[in-house]
Protein backbone atom coordinates (compact mmCIF):
# COMPACT_ATOMS: atom_id res chain seq x y z
CA UNK A 1 0.00 0.00 0.00
CA UNK A 2 2.85 2.39 0.86
CA UNK A 3 4.49 1.64 -2.48
CA UNK A 4 1.28 2.52 -4.34
CA UNK A 5 0.97 5.77 -2.39
CA UNK A 6 4.60 6.70 -3.08
CA UNK A 7 4.13 5.84 -6.77
CA UNK A 8 1.00 8.02 -6.96
CA UNK A 9 2.82 10.93 -5.34
CA UNK A 10 5.74 10.56 -7.76
CA UNK A 11 3.40 10.43 -10.75
CA UNK A 12 1.59 13.57 -9.61
CA UNK A 13 4.89 15.37 -9.07
CA UNK A 14 6.10 14.35 -12.54
CA UNK A 15 2.81 15.41 -14.14
CA UNK A 16 3.05 18.78 -12.43
CA UNK A 17 6.64 19.21 -13.59
CA UNK A 18 5.72 18.29 -17.14
CA UNK A 19 2.79 20.72 -17.13
CA UNK A 20 5.04 23.49 -15.79
CA UNK A 21 7.72 22.74 -18.39
CA UNK A 22 5.15 22.69 -21.20
CA UNK A 23 3.64 25.95 -20.00
CA UNK A 24 7.00 27.66 -20.01
CA UNK A 25 8.10 26.18 -23.34
CA UNK A 26 7.42 29.61 -24.85
CA UNK A 27 10.20 31.03 -22.66
CA UNK A 28 12.66 28.45 -23.94
CA UNK A 29 11.69 29.31 -27.52
CA UNK A 30 11.57 33.08 -26.94
CA UNK A 31 13.95 33.83 -24.07
CA UNK A 32 13.93 37.58 -24.53
CA UNK A 33 11.41 40.11 -25.76
CA UNK A 34 11.60 40.86 -29.48
CA UNK A 35 11.34 44.62 -28.94
CA UNK A 36 13.08 45.54 -25.70
CA UNK A 37 15.27 42.50 -25.07
CA UNK A 38 13.95 41.93 -21.54
CA UNK A 39 14.31 38.47 -20.01
CA UNK A 40 10.89 36.79 -20.37
CA UNK A 41 11.64 34.36 -17.52
CA UNK A 42 12.24 37.26 -15.15
CA UNK A 43 8.97 38.82 -16.32
CA UNK A 44 7.05 35.55 -16.58
CA UNK A 45 4.10 37.16 -14.76
CA UNK A 46 3.55 39.74 -17.54
CA UNK A 47 4.86 37.91 -20.60
CA UNK A 48 2.83 37.48 -23.75
CA UNK A 49 2.93 35.16 -26.74
CA UNK A 50 1.35 36.05 -30.06
CA UNK A 51 0.87 33.15 -32.44
CA UNK A 52 0.43 33.81 -36.14
CA UNK A 53 -0.28 31.17 -38.80
CA UNK A 54 3.40 31.00 -39.79
CA UNK A 55 5.25 32.13 -36.66
CA UNK A 56 5.08 33.18 -33.04
CA UNK A 57 6.62 36.01 -31.08
CA UNK A 58 7.45 36.17 -27.38
CA UNK A 59 7.07 39.48 -25.61
CA UNK A 60 7.60 40.79 -22.07
CA UNK A 61 4.41 42.80 -21.66
CA UNK A 62 1.24 44.20 -23.17
CA UNK A 63 3.25 47.30 -24.17
CA UNK A 64 5.52 45.26 -26.45
CA UNK A 65 2.59 43.11 -27.65
CA UNK A 66 0.81 46.29 -28.75
CA UNK A 67 3.93 47.24 -30.72
CA UNK A 68 3.96 43.87 -32.46
CA UNK A 69 0.26 43.95 -33.30
CA UNK A 70 0.70 47.44 -34.80
CA UNK A 71 3.75 46.33 -36.79
CA UNK A 72 2.09 43.16 -38.13
CA UNK A 73 -1.05 44.69 -39.63
CA UNK A 74 -1.10 42.19 -42.49
CA UNK A 75 -1.01 39.20 -40.12
CA UNK A 76 -4.06 38.02 -38.23
CA UNK A 77 -3.15 36.54 -34.83
CA UNK A 78 -4.28 32.94 -34.39
CA UNK A 79 -3.90 33.37 -30.62
CA UNK A 80 -2.87 36.09 -28.20
CA UNK A 81 -1.74 34.66 -24.88
CA UNK A 82 -0.75 36.34 -21.65
CA UNK A 83 0.57 35.08 -18.35
CA UNK A 84 -1.82 34.94 -15.45
CA UNK A 85 -0.29 37.35 -12.91
CA UNK A 86 -0.43 34.82 -10.07
CA UNK A 87 0.27 31.42 -11.66
CA UNK A 88 2.39 32.66 -14.60
CA UNK A 89 0.53 30.18 -16.83
CA UNK A 90 -0.36 31.39 -20.31
CA UNK A 91 -4.05 32.11 -20.80
CA UNK A 92 -6.15 33.60 -23.59
CA UNK A 93 -5.48 37.37 -23.43
CA UNK A 94 -8.80 38.22 -25.04
CA UNK A 95 -10.86 36.37 -22.41
CA UNK A 96 -8.64 37.17 -19.41
CA UNK A 97 -9.74 39.64 -16.76
CA UNK A 98 -7.37 42.60 -16.76
CA UNK A 99 -6.46 45.10 -14.07
CA UNK A 100 -5.50 48.57 -15.21
CA UNK A 101 -3.42 50.72 -12.86
CA UNK A 102 -2.87 50.23 -9.15
CA UNK A 103 0.20 50.56 -6.95
CA UNK A 104 2.17 47.58 -8.35
CA UNK A 105 4.72 48.93 -10.85
CA UNK A 106 3.96 47.87 -14.42
CA UNK A 107 6.30 46.33 -17.00
CA UNK A 108 7.38 48.77 -19.72
CA UNK A 109 4.61 51.17 -18.70
CA UNK A 110 3.74 53.85 -16.20
CA UNK A 111 0.19 52.50 -15.88
CA UNK A 112 0.27 48.80 -15.03
CA UNK A 113 -1.76 46.26 -17.00
CA UNK A 114 -2.08 42.79 -15.42
CA UNK A 115 -4.01 39.74 -16.61
CA UNK A 116 -5.84 37.22 -14.44
CA UNK A 117 -7.46 33.90 -15.29
CA UNK A 118 -10.38 34.61 -12.95
CA UNK A 119 -12.34 37.73 -12.13
CA UNK A 120 -12.19 36.80 -8.42
CA UNK A 121 -8.37 36.93 -8.47
CA UNK A 122 -8.46 40.26 -10.29
CA UNK A 123 -10.90 41.67 -7.72
CA UNK A 124 -8.68 40.41 -4.88
CA UNK A 125 -5.68 42.13 -6.51
CA UNK A 126 -7.64 45.39 -6.85
CA UNK A 127 -8.73 45.22 -3.19
CA UNK A 128 -5.07 44.91 -2.13
CA UNK A 129 -3.37 47.14 -4.72
CA UNK A 130 -5.93 49.38 -6.34
CA UNK A 131 -6.64 49.61 -10.03
CA UNK A 132 -9.65 48.94 -12.19
CA UNK A 133 -10.98 45.65 -13.57
CA UNK A 134 -11.32 45.84 -17.36
CA UNK A 135 -11.52 43.57 -20.40
CA UNK A 136 -8.86 43.00 -23.07
CA UNK A 137 -10.20 45.74 -25.36
CA UNK A 138 -9.84 48.33 -22.60
CA UNK A 139 -6.37 47.05 -21.63
CA UNK A 140 -4.98 47.09 -25.17
CA UNK A 141 -6.60 50.45 -25.83
CA UNK A 142 -4.87 51.78 -22.71
CA UNK A 143 -1.57 50.34 -23.97
CA UNK A 144 -1.92 52.34 -27.19
CA UNK A 145 -3.03 55.48 -25.29
CA UNK A 146 0.01 55.17 -23.01
CA UNK A 147 2.47 54.40 -25.82
CA UNK A 148 3.99 57.87 -26.16
CA UNK A 149 4.48 58.42 -22.42
CA UNK A 150 5.78 54.88 -21.97
CA UNK A 151 8.33 55.06 -24.80
CA UNK A 152 9.46 58.45 -23.53
CA UNK A 153 9.88 57.00 -20.00
CA UNK A 154 11.82 54.00 -21.38
CA UNK A 155 14.17 56.23 -23.38
CA UNK A 156 14.86 58.41 -20.34
CA UNK A 157 15.58 55.39 -18.14
CA UNK A 158 17.94 53.92 -20.73
CA UNK A 159 19.73 57.23 -21.09
CA UNK A 160 20.16 57.44 -17.30
CA UNK A 161 21.50 53.87 -17.20
CA UNK A 162 24.07 54.73 -19.89
CA UNK A 163 25.22 57.76 -17.89
CA UNK A 164 25.60 55.63 -14.77
CA UNK A 165 27.77 53.11 -16.64
CA UNK A 166 30.11 55.84 -17.85
Image (tube, helix red, strand yellow):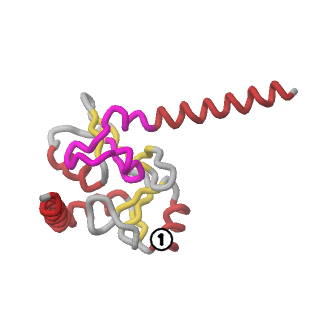
Whether residue 69 is visible to the viewer of this picture, yes or no, is: no
Query: Which x, y percent locates residue 96?
Result: 43, 54
Quarter where residue 164 is shown: bottom left
Q: Is residue 8 magenta?
A: no
Query: Which x, y percent locates residue 129?
Result: 46, 72
Taking 145 as reference, is 16 above or below it?
above
Relative placement, left or right, of 6 versus 89 is right
Whether residue 65 is visible to the viewer of this picture, yes or no, is: yes
Query: Which x, y percent locates residue 85?
Result: 45, 55
Quarter where residue 102 is shown: bottom left
**Label 1 sits on residue:** 126
> What residue is drawn where x is 51% and y is 50%?
87
> What residue is drawn where x is 34% and y is 45%?
40
Magenta-highlighted residues: 24-49
The N terminus - image quarter: top right
> What residue is drawn where x is 34% and y is 40%?
79
Amino acid sequence: MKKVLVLCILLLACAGGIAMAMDQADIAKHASCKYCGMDRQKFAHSRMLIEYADSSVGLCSLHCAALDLANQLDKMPAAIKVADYNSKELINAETATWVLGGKVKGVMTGRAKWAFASKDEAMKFVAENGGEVVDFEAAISAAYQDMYQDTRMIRQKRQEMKKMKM
